[in-house]
Image (cartoon, coloured by chain):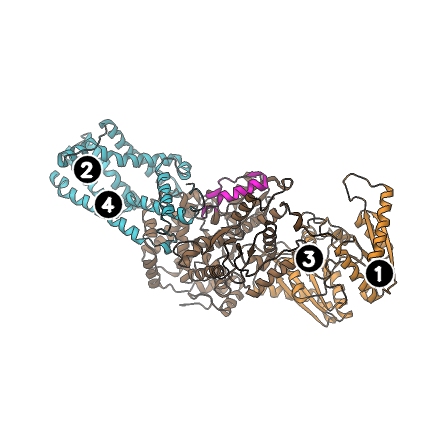
Amino acid sequence: MPEGILCNKQVVDTKEKLNALLADKSGKQYYDEMTRLDVDTEALWATIEKTCKSRLRTWLEICAHCGMCADSCFIYLANKRDPKQVPSYKIQSTLGEIVKRKGKVDNEFMRYVMDTAWAKCTCCNRCATYCPFGIDMGVMFGYVRGLCFSHGFVPWELKIGSGMHRIYKAQMDITTEDWVDTCEWMVEEYEEDWPGLEIPVDKENADIIYTVNAREPKHYPEDLAEAAILFHIAGENWTVPSQGWEETSLAMFAGDWGACKLQVESVYAAMDRLKPKRMVVTECGHAYRATVLEGPYWAGIKSGKTPIESFHYVEWVAEALRTGKLKIDPAKKIKEPVTYQDSCNYIRNGGLGDYAREIMSYIAEDFREMKPCREHNFCCGGGGGLNGIGRYRKERNIGLTVKRDQILATGAKLVVTPCHNCWDAIRDLEEVYKIGIRWSFLKPLLLGMVEVPEHLLPREE
Amino acid sequence: MFKKILFATTSSPACDNAAKVAFDLELKWDAKLMVFHVLGVPTRGYSSFVTDVRTGETESIDPDYVEWVTEEMKYTYENLLKDSENSTLEAVIGVPHREILRKARKENVDMIIMGAHTRDEDIGATRYRSVVGSTMQKVAKSARCPVIIVSRPCTTCWKLFSNIVICTDFTKASNSAFLWAAKLSKEVNARLHIFHAVDINAGEPGKVSGQSEIEGRINEAKGRIETMYIPELKDFDNYEVGTREGTPYVEILKFAREKQADLIVMAHHTREIDPELALLGSTVEQVVLRSACPVTSVNHPDKVADE
Amino acid sequence: MYELVTGPLAWLSFGIFFFGLFYRLVWYIRGLNWQMDRVSYTQNMVYGIKGALRSILFWLVPFGTRSWRYYPGFTILVFIFHICLLATPVFLMGHNVLLLERWGFSLPTLPEGIADFMTTCVIVSAVFIICRRIALPEVRILTKPYDLFVLAIAVAPFITGFFAFHQVGSYDFWIIAHVLCGEIMLVAIPFTKLSHFLLFFLSRAQMGMDYGIKRGGMKNKGMAW
């Protein structure tokens, strides 16, 4: 079968296609069709010739096969040091083979490549910092994901996810009306406790344009309300765009570069339209990476920077605490041992480790670092889309053990997790391994300890 | 008074008593009843997994699963649905309190009915109570309409209520609760008991209030009831005023029992306690868990005033 | 024969070596693409250069990076191997004598004993590297005959040179074999994995620019390698 009804080389760009995929139970039919999907070896090779240039070729070629990347990979460690999980082996046996065979690979091989690219690598890029040559297997697997996607070999959930971005410019089916209505709803719900609270939509020339993860308006709008309250307390002049509010990119996890471009352009268009001074992104790791770090390149912006300067939420919080916009009540600081989950996407790959420490110095009395930490921290276990893929649930749960042991070693019972994926992975690791920990985003923690200026308190009659 | 009723159910026996009240109200008030079940809590990051509200198990979500749960609901409420004239069943994915509030807001409902759990021996009771307890508190705090919580069999039909207790702490929210209770009392011609409990534990910790001070506070409360509430009742005279001192929830329960209350109405004391931190901490929840009759929490003026 | 291998063949192999490396350099740089690599190389050159230098320097220092510190034994092995492999031929007395004879200049030279010791170091560390390849499962799975072949090319001049210097058997045989092996190595550098002679620096520089420009270099003090 050249192309399946659900599993094919087409992108999902209509609601009909999307609904057909969604109706497939756990992707059963989709994965069944995948076993019969033809590999267009010529197109595959043509793409490689065009896009696999000196950087990737050099990485593939000069790899000394020294194995120094082995221990850098949490999946290798979690799988009892299975040699098949050594990053170098993983990339050489997939991309390396495809290049060696000049694209002449079959369906079974492509499914192996898919399983490797999504279940054995979260694109945390830790290996790149352990390889003497700086060979970045994470970057290469990102590239492999792109190849897989364009040939139809992509996990079901991510095919849906990238389709969502194409259709809704968001990872979930949220329309502009839904989003604006959610903003209004949250103001309604919280304005009694916070008189004067607002979530200004489409306000021009604001100091801050705030963008979120679609799961917040969809399922956890409190997060949006909490952000609004913190901006309110800090006295920020801020806004959210009615369109272009979604920061995340499942398309990046899927390797659907076309959808990546569409998604970030919607955010950049909001910047152009509303002319804010800077953007602040919610507590999400891959969203920051997609829209702030990688996005400009997808959109073809030569400076490699977003049209206006962009900040991760931790940068804003650190700044607000430093400048006194937010003041912490010393009596309410976190007294118990607490640790911080460094998100690969904005700590290792965004360099924001210092800001996280700065925040912790204001809010925690007994802050304990994981070992290793900062740029060298291990992935939570659910990055790169792995949390969301049913097919790889078992593999994901094995991977969580590394983070579990890291957290246990700190002795902390509270983990600060300013990243949606990390939050989930740590929640899941508690559910699977029951180690008795709690975890939280920064916003609810901050709300519990900031000093609220007298004039912002509700007036008691 | 009740045109649209949202019955938020866990679709389990814990909500059976609430279900009976909900379907009864639908018939007696010619209301539209929406039976609403939130079946799974989604993840924060991207995934199609949800945590089943009842079992705590992780489930992979798809349209079939949601349909299956809806079918199951039909089966659960088979008997009640037989007589029902205007009801719908719906199962959705989401965080329970959030989806209940979303639905209530979207449909502009006049009341929300929820069940509560009182028997510890049931399997999963602890988990259930922690999920439902916090859901109930969050819904009660934020809902624009009254929230009725039914934990024990309610033998009296609402139309036949004869005693309604309104517990006030003189906050703005309590005022709304009072107005709603008064409206209902007038409508079903029940006796309205306006009640305030002076909290002897309030104030500085460790400091025991003297008898004279307590009496002073009781008199003050009586005075406030006279000036704040009685004029609002206008020509309605089937009411009485009661005040007690003690731990509020205990006094409320004692008073309700004495007066053979069919319904307790109170405001959720918003700033009382963080619902996340103390699951069984608030006065509302203590009353809900122990009350023999249904409890209504009213916090907002939206669905209270006469149209 | 000696004349042939030290004359035309030497010219040829040095020619291939330099030209090959030059080609590699041009090919590598031309193959970089700001948009595909997602690094704005030219637009943020200053950050890029800073990142590149940091990336190279930290990795050139023994135990200079977390990775080097993580594998102390192997790090020692790698640095001994590479330092001896690069320094010995350049500063060997015999080579510099040749240089002086042919081109009239010479570099500082190593005492013979030290050079001999360093040659031994290359051979011994190569043996250890092979043992490590066989002993560790995570390295064994990566090892291909090609890896051993490349290692053999790199070490062969040292083995043959060692035998020639110590006059084990026929000196003439070993010296010609030594020169040939050296020339094979020179020719092999641009064509095999040995190209990391140059590409190590380019690849490290590229990764450094990535970290210096995109992955936080503009917001922090530089990647903590």
Please state which of the two labelled residues, at mark 1 or mark 2, is closer to the viewer.
1
Q: Amino acid at mark 4?
A: Ala
**Location of mark 2 (residue):** C178
**Location of mark 4 (residue):** C188
Could you tell me which chain the residue with mark 3 belongs to? B
Magenta stretch bounds: A347-375
Chain letter for the brown colouring in the rendering: A
**Location of mark 3 (residue):** B142
**Location of mark 1 (residue):** B231
Please state which of the two labelled residues, at mark 1 or mark 3, is closer to the viewer.
1
What kind of element bears circle 2?
helix
Have a look at marks 3 and 2 and say if they share a chain. Answer: no
The answer to the question of whether label 1 and label 4 lie on touching residues, with beta carbons closer than 8 A, is: no
What kind of element bears circle 3?
helix
Chain C visual colour: cyan
Chain B visual colour: orange
Q: Amino acid at mark 1?
A: Pro
